[in-house]
Image (spheres, helix red, strand yellow):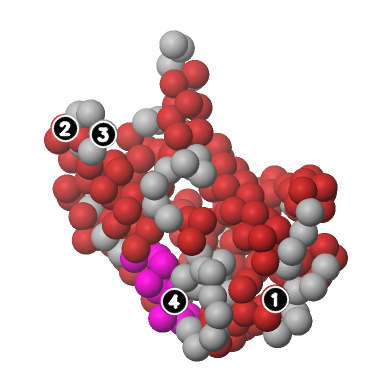
């Protein structure tokens, strides 16, 4: 296996749907959005996902993932903790904060069970951040496995998109063809969004998605639920 080939395989493993972090159990407000009629077609689902990609992903998650990656690569533990806490504080509802923490701890458990984890200082030095911010785990793993920042951002965004579309297919519901069409259409925006990340200043980080926050809040008391958010 070449040096360039192994990091790519590690990246596929890190963002695989089979990674036991419970990503498939959270809908991030989609379940309530369907219940109240906000999402009822392929087009409305497309618009919902694209708005989150253009706001929350572009101005919150991806810039913070980039900063966490940089902090991890330079062993700046204080900055690493700062940006991880920033992300956790930006989760606007109980369900979204709970998801962040649960998936962070699940990812840390996975990483700590891999061979050689005891010789992985970043897992121990950044433990506080890794217990509350799942992006922190992705950043530490990517640095350790020599995955490039661009590849990490691309794979993370694709993984989020794929999981979101799968949730929508179950809940709206949408057929397989509609799901593939959504992936095809929305994936063309990934590179455009990633190219903007280096130009986003610290004071620009923190875009809010009010509709998602409202849906997530109301989902807490939704009578019939399949998902945890």
Magenta stretch: dominant secondary structure? helix
Mark 3 touches mark 2? (CB < 8 Å): no
Residue shown at the point (79%, 73%) measured from the top left: 40
Could you tell me which secondary element the residue under label 1 belongs to?
Answer: helix
Above or below, comparing residue 18 to residue 44 in the picture: above
Above or below, comparing residue 46 to residue 144 in the picture: below
Within the image, what quadrant is residue 101 found in? bottom left
Q: CA distance from mark 1 to mark 4?
A: 17 Å
Q: CA distance from mark 1 to mark 2?
A: 46 Å
Above or below, comparing residue 92 to residue 120 in the picture: below
Mark 1 touches mark 4? (CB < 8 Å): no
Dot 1 or dot 4, earlier in sequence: 1
- Residue that numbered label 2 is attached to: 119
Provide the residue span drawn in magenta: 92-101
Could you tell me which secondary element the residue under label 2 belongs to?
Answer: helix
- Residue that numbered label 1 is attached to: 34
**Residue 68 appearing in the image:** no
- Residue that numbered label 3 is attached to: 114
Pick the front one: 172 or 202? 172
Q: CA distance from mark 3 to mark 1?
A: 39 Å
Dot 4 or dot 3, earlier in sequence: 4
Dot 4 or dot 2, earlier in sequence: 4
Q: Is residue 141 rendered magenta in the image?
A: no
Position of residue 224 measured from the top left corner of the image (x, y, whole percent):
55, 80
Mark 3 burial class by Cα count in 10 Å: few <14, some 14-19, many 20+: few
Within the image, what quadrant is residue 144 found in? top left
């Amino acid at each position: 296996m070449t040096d360039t080939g192994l990091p790519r395989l590690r990246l596929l493993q890190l963002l695989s749907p089979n990674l036991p972090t419970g990503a498939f159990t959270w809908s991030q407000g989609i379940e309530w959005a369907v219940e109240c009629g906000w999402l009822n077609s392929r087009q409305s689902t497309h618009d919902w996902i694209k708005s989150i990609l253009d706001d929350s992903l572009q101005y919150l998650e991806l810039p913070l993932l980039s900063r966490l990656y940089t902090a991890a690569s330079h062993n700046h533990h204080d900055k690493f903790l700062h940006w991880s806490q920033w992300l956790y504080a930006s989760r606007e509802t109980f369900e979204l904060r709970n998801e962040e923490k649960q998936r962070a701890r699940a990812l840390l458990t996975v990483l700590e069970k891999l061979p050689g984890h005891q010789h992985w200082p970043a897992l121990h030095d950044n433990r506080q951040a890794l217990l509350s911010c799942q992006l922190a785990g992705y950043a530490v793993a990517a640095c350790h496995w020599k995955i490039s920042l661009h590849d990490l951002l691309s794979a993370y965004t694709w993984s989020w998109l794929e999981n979101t579309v799968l949730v929508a297919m179950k809940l709206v519901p949408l057929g397989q063809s509609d799901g593939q069409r959504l992936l095809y259409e929305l994936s063309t925006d990934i590179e455009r969004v990633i190219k903007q990340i280096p130009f986003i200043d610290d004071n620009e980080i923190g875009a809010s998605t009010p509709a998602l926050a409202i849906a997530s809040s109301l989902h807490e008391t939704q009578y019939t639920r399949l998902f945890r958010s």
